[in-house]
Structures are given as C-alpha cells and as structure tokens.
Image (tube, grey):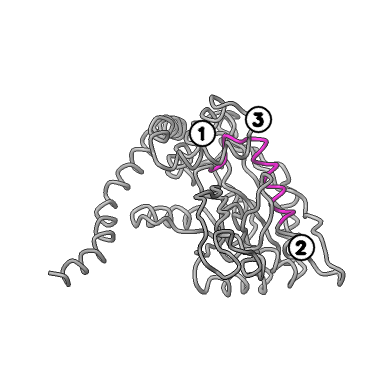
Amino acid sequence: MLRLALVLNRHLPRMAGIAMIPLVRCLFWLARVLGTERASRTGGAIARRVGPFLPANRIALANLRAAYPEKDEAKIKALAREAWDNLGRTGAEYAHLATLFDVDPADPASQRMSVAGAEHFEALRDDGKPGLIFAAHLANWELPAICAARYGLVATAIFRPPNDIASARLVAEVRRETMGGLAAAGQGAVFSMQGVVERGGHLGQLIDQHFTRGVVVEFFGRPVLVNPLLAKLAKHYECPVHGVRVVRKDNAHFHLELTPPLDLPRDAKGEIDVQGAMQAMTRVVEEWVRDNPGQWLWMHRRWRPNMLPKPKGALAKQPDPSRDHRGNVTSVTGEGAVT
C-alpha cells in the first residue's frame, strides 16, 4: 500500500495535467471563436471577478501597499483588480497572438499595434553584432518577441514554461508559430543562451521576477534579487542592451516601445559593472510599472526579504539577547519582525 501511495503521489499531478489538456484546448478554441475583442474583454471580466478571491490576491495587495504607501485601501484594491483584468485579457489573447500584428490597409481600425523605436529594431537587425533586450510582465508581455520577428530581427526569447502541462503545451505551440527562437529557462539553459550571443544573435529576457541566485538591486525602494545573466553577457561581449515595454490601450490595442541602448555603469577597469547594470535595467522597469501600475503582474512574490544574502559574519557577531555571558537562557521576549 505504501508503494502504491508513493506511485500515485508521484504521477497524479501529471495525470491531472494531461486530463486538463482537452479543457484548455476547448477554452482556447472558444477564445478564437469569440474574436480578439470579445475574447480579451471576456478574459478580463472573468479574472477581475474571480481574482480577488484567490490566494494570490493577498500577495498582490501586500505588494501594492508596500509599493504605494500613500494610496488608500480603495485605490490599492482597484489597482489589484486592474492587474487581474490585464492578466485575464493576456491569457485570452493567446488565441490571437498570431493576428495581433495583422493590418488590413483598407481598414485603419484593424491596426492594433503602434511601435515606437522601430529604428532600434532595424539597427539591431542590420548591425551584424549581438544584442540584448530586457522586458517586464507588463500588458501583454508576449508581444515584444512577436514584434521582433515581424521586423525581421532574429531573436531568442528566454521563457519559463507554465507548471500546468496542458497550458505549457499550448503556450509552446503558440510561441513556435508567432515568435523567433525560444529558450526555456532551466539547467543548461545558460550555455545555449551564451551560444546565441556568441553567434551574433539577439537574446530577450523578462527581468522582473525573483531569482534566488541573483544579485541584489532596489525595486520600489526595497531590495530584490534579479537574474544577472544579461549584465554578465553585456560585460563579456560588449553588446548593446535595450529595454522593451508594452502598454495596453483600449481593449486589445497596444503600444510597444523599444528604448535606445542603455548607457550602463562601469567599474574602475572600464568594464560593465554587473550589479550596477542590473540596477539600471531594474530602474527602467520600475518607471514603466509606475506609469501603468494596473498592467503589471503584482501577484508574483517579487520581494522575498528572507532570501536575501546575509552579510558575512553578521550572525556570528550578533549577541543572543536571551542568554547571559555564560550562555544560559535568561528570557524570551517573543518579539520579532515580520516582513
């Protein structure tokens, strides 16, 4: 019985994920039948109503309160609902990623995308050198990779596959149809990403998620851990680093902006400073989020103070207030800080 329990415990999640595949594909088909506008509105409406009752909403509210201490509770909850709305719309728009850039010359209203910084896409495409692009979970964050492909820019997007098997399969299919190269984050991925840059290619990465082995930067006035990969590649290959963001307009209409190459900080040797470079990129992301706070993924546990690196020797040097000079326990106050 114990062996059976272990087998079931190991395989049930996968079996459940496989069973979900028909349901997810049915929802995907329904989104396509509804059309871009109605699918986006429907996805947003469902997420806006359901999201506040999910556990992740507590994370969103806590993040918003810490980021905007000056805002009252009504405004904080309103921003959280906007974030859920954006997330629902983004999910529903997956069924239409292949057509969001399509334009009918006879119908100006069919233009769903406006692009600022197209000259930077063209420069990256034509300069014969490698290049790096960072982005964030803003509006529909899948669109920059599609835009690059439409401008003929050969780029590899680093992505984290969804945990759910059904969603992961469908997302992978959609991405293969609409984007350039793809590299799944995980063990061994760094070598393939390095190979892209060595071959003169272009690499894009979302940098606004927690990374346990990252470098410490400040985001909304609080320390966070960020993946230093782009800064390390920029330092090693001396290649330009651009930022790209998407802004959601009415319904399924978007504005995409590609920044000029950033002037990244350097150390005394004249080399790019990895921590300083990641701070510069994170500062740009923070400005983007402040411009449109309701379009960012606040449900992510971006701030994890307990996982920040401890100063070396700090624990050994700190006396234990509950013990006397002989090491005997004298008292326990029960006080502590919770962040």
| SS at mark 1 in the image | helix
> Residue 233 vs residue 144: left or right?
right
Quadrant of the snapshot with the N terminus: bottom left
Of residues 216 and 192, the one nearer the viewer is 216
* Residue 134 falls inside the magenta stretch: no
Mark whose residue sits in front, 1 or 3: 3
Of residues 109 and 215, the one nearer the viewer is 215
Which amino acid, by three-letter code, is at mark 2? Answer: Asp
| SS at mark 2 in the image | loop
| Residue that sits furthest to the left in the current view | 1
Which amino acid, by three-letter code, is at mark 1? Answer: Ala
* Residue 24: % across, % down: 32, 47
Chain part drawn in magenta: 279-297
**Who comes first in sequence, dot 3 or dot 2?**
3
**Who comes first in sequence, dot 1 or dot 3?**
3
* Residue 200: % across, % down: 69, 70
Residue 231 location, quadrant: bottom right
Residue 228 location, quadrant: bottom right
Of residues 305 and 285, the one nearer the viewer is 305
Task: Assess disc 3: are there few (<14), some (14-19) or many (≥20) residues with their C-alpha within 10 Å of its C-alpha.
Answer: few
Return the mark for residue 70: 3
Tally the numbered discs: 3
Residue 109 location, quadrant: top right
Q: In this figure, which residue is indicated by the disc labeled 1?
A: 80
**Who comes first in sequence, dot 1 or dot 2?**
1
Task: Assess disc 2: are there few (<14), some (14-19) or many (≥20) residues with their C-alpha within 10 Å of its C-alpha.
Answer: few
Q: In this figure, which residue is indicated by the disc labeled 2?
A: 127
* Residue 282 falls inside the magenta stretch: yes
